[in-house]
Amino acid sequence: MIGKTGLWVLLCIMLTSCAMPSAKPARLNASNAKPEVIMETFLRSFVAYDYERCRSLLADGATITIIRQDGTQEFERSMQSATDWLNTIEQSGVKGLDTFQIEIHDITSQTHRHGATVTVKFTASGSAPGMAFANSGFDTGNLIETAEGWRIAHYSSFESFSGSE
């Protein structure tokens, strides 16, 4: 028969032999990631020029809207398929920059029966020979649950942009 001390020792051995969590951060498993993780991953992948990763986080038929104020009272507006937008950026966009970074200040998320809405407050900056830019604003993703997990159905960026040469 095992006494109280023996029982405690046995319990401690059992608990310490259980798999402990790894000290290494796990690679994103987009099939079970929360909506806010999908949005942050999309932004960070975009800045890293990882457009394939960005595409993998989009729902079929995803769209993107950009509303940008460029130092005046006028707003530039565009809406297109997210795939077309990424293709354009990939061919002629931000890859020519020497530096490109984003700072995420806040992420809020609301989940509802239709999906989730995630808003990211950010600032970004970059430079290339003879020019520099900064922008700040809010990116909002409307996400839906698919067989592959949460995916971005509509991405909207509302930003203030300034540049110099």
Image (tube, rainbow, N blue to C red):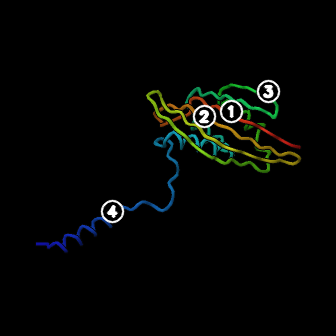
**Which residue in the protein does label 2 denote?**
140
Q: Which amino acid type corresponds to the residue marked 4 in the rendered image? A: Cys
Is disc 3 surrounded by few (<14), some (14 to 19) or many (20+) residues within 10 Å? Answer: few
Q: Are marks 2 and 4 in contact (CB under 8 Å)?
A: no
**Which residue in the protein does label 1 denote?**
158
Mark 3–mark 1 Cα distance, whole angstroms, equals: 13 Å
| Location of residue 71 (image quadrant) | top right
Q: Which amino acid type corresponds to the residue marked 2 in the rendered image? A: Thr
Mark 1–mark 2 Cα distance, whole angstroms, equals: 8 Å
Taking 95 as reference, is 158 above or below it? above
**Which residue in the protein does label 3 denote?**
74
Front tag of 3 and 4: 3
The kind of secondary structure element at disc 1 is: strand
Q: Which amino acid type corresponds to the residue marked 1 in the rendered image? A: Phe
Disc with the residue nearer the chain's start (3 vs 4): 4
The kind of secondary structure element at disc 3 is: loop
| Location of residue 42 (image quadrant) | top right
Work out whether residue 110 or residue 142 is closer to the camera in this orientation and state it: 110
Q: Is residue 19 left or right of residue 115?
A: left
